[in-house]
Image: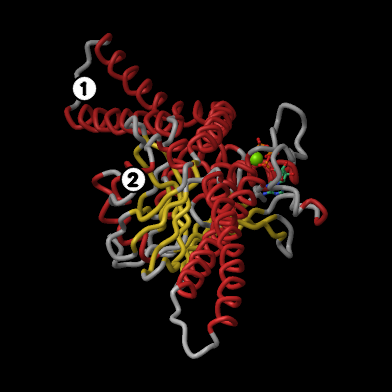
Amino acid sequence: MLAQFREFCQNLSSRLLFSVGLTLQKMGSTIRQKRIEPDTQRDQYQKSVEQTSDQIRIKELEDRLAGAEKKYDAIFNNIPNPVFVLDITTLDVLDCNESVKAVYGYARDEVISRPFLNLFFEEEKEYYAFKLRTASLLHHVRHITGDNTSLLVNIRISASEYPGKKVLLVTTSDETKRLEQEQQIVQASKMATLGEMATGIAHELNQPLSVIKTASNFFMKKINHQEPIPEEILLTLSREIDSHVDRATRIINHMRQFGRKSENTSAKIQVNDILKSAFEIFSQQLKVRGIDVLWELEEDIPCVMADANRLEQVFINLLLNARDAIDEKYNDQRLSKNMGRITLKTSADTKNVGIVVSDTGIGIPVDKLNKIFDPFFTTKTVGKGTGLGLSITYSIVREYQGNIRAVNNDDGGATFIITFPRVPEDSP
Ligand SMILES: Nc1ncnc2c1ncn2[C@@H]1O[C@H](COP(=O)(O)OP(=O)(O)OP(=O)(O)O)[C@@H](O)[C@H]1O
Ligand SMILES: [Mg+2]
């Protein structure tokens, strides 16, 4: 929040400074024009007095202008964020501040009069050439520094005027460190989730293993008794073994993939697929607890831009919370009555794709509704919850320009509603 506010102020100050700079330049040219205005019919003496006082005034104004220009330069160059002034047609850099050197390692003359797109990766140049002219804010863009390392930056773009030219005023802010730290927290919480899910995964793996064990026992028994195995039975059991080995492999691969550190990339993805794959990891856990899952997925739902692995973590966090809320409400009685239910719903309108995760658990006390997304807020006992699940969920959702909110259901339980902007159909 603080970082966003600081960035907002920096962006605002760079724009203000830019317009102050333009005003100063205009003042300068007015003064210079005034200096060469031709004399007309005035009396020579009066004229020379006027001229002298004019000259004094001009000199004063020039001094003030030079002072103000100096001040403007000092402030412009001391803005901690790199600021670039770009030609709107060619996207060449017309001017930039000193922070470019500190952040990117390029001296000003290595950047000025060269294409701004030189800072981008070759394969992304065309895409960002379009985006720079049409968007006002770009998130997590990869830039190349002077020593060939890459930075992840947010870019703010606004149209402005430079003497005689339409320009783009571009401010970048280096997000690399913040994203790395965030990634470490996300990774730590993912590991905690994996640990918590270990029992469920054991259940998931137990099923294929016991099928394989039964089949192999059958084979051994037949061989020990020197009894022939009918070909049809042999084929059926081999097929069973084969498909259960595939299932176990799929579960293990899925866990491996989920545990992997995800990159901060985003691609076009289908939320239905991710929801199904998040559910797959612990369907067995829910079954064991007698929790039903109701699916209401919209078919052929439009894509959203996100990272599949991170989005899966969002859904797993919500499913784990729903599971805990149901557990807490029904305790042991639930298993017999089979009363817990989680509803998973997706839908789309002209702008957004929506995902709804609803449960029949304890619900959220009204005075806690605005706290649940805070880091470390938990109502669970020590060792059961860290209170990071929803705060990480919130930051992942926001990272992909989505929104998340929680409401209580009229008939008990809580509902989490997420929306993401849908990707236009013609988008590459
Ligand atoms: N579906 C839900 N129903 C009722 N309360 C909920 C639900 N989801 C979250 N909460 C409340 O919000 C709190 C914060 O949730 P969050 O996922 O951030 O942390 P946690 O589940 O307590 O711990 P962690 O997820 O780190 O293991 C929970 O402790 C709980 O009080
Ligand atoms: Mg949680």
Using the image as rendered, state which of residue 339 and residue 416 is in the foreground. Answer: 416
- Is residue 194 left or right of 117 when viewed as pictured? right
* In this view, 298 is above or below 350: above
Q: Residue at x 50, y 29 (%)?
A: 203
- Label count reads 2
Provide the secondary structure element on which disc 1 rests.
loop
Provide the secondary structure element on which disc 2 rests.
helix
Mark 1–mark 2 Cα distance, whole angstroms, equals 78 Å
Residue 346 x, y percent position in the rendering: 49, 61
Mark 1 crowd level (few <14, some 14–19, many ≥20, 10 Å Cα):
few
In the image, the residue with mark 1 has its CB under 8 Å from the nearest atom of ligand 1: no
Tell me, yes or no, whether the two marked residues, 1 and 2, touch with CB atoms within 8 Å: no
Residue 111: assigned label: 2
Q: Earlier in the sequence, mark 1 or mark 2?
A: 2
Of circles 1 and 2, which is in front? Answer: 2
* In this view, 71 is above or below 224: below
Q: Residue at x 72, y 47 (%)?
A: 372
Mark 2 crowd level (few <14, some 14–19, many ≥20, 10 Å Cα):
many
The answer to which quarter of the image holds residue 47 is: bottom right
Residue 229: assigned label: 1
Residue projecting furthest to the bottom? 41
Using the image as rendered, state which of residue 365 and residue 69 is in the foreground. Answer: 69
Q: Amino acid at mark 2?
A: Val
Whether residue 281 is visible to the viewer of this picture, yes or no, is: yes
Q: Residue at x 50, y 33 (%)?
A: 180
- Is residue 372 left or right of 314 when viewed as pictured? right
Q: Residue at x 58, y 50 (%)?
A: 7
In the image, the residue with mark 2 has its CB under 8 Å from the nearest atom of ligand 1: no
Whether residue 343 is visible to the viewer of this picture, yes or no, is: no
Residue 288 x, y percent position in the rendering: 58, 37
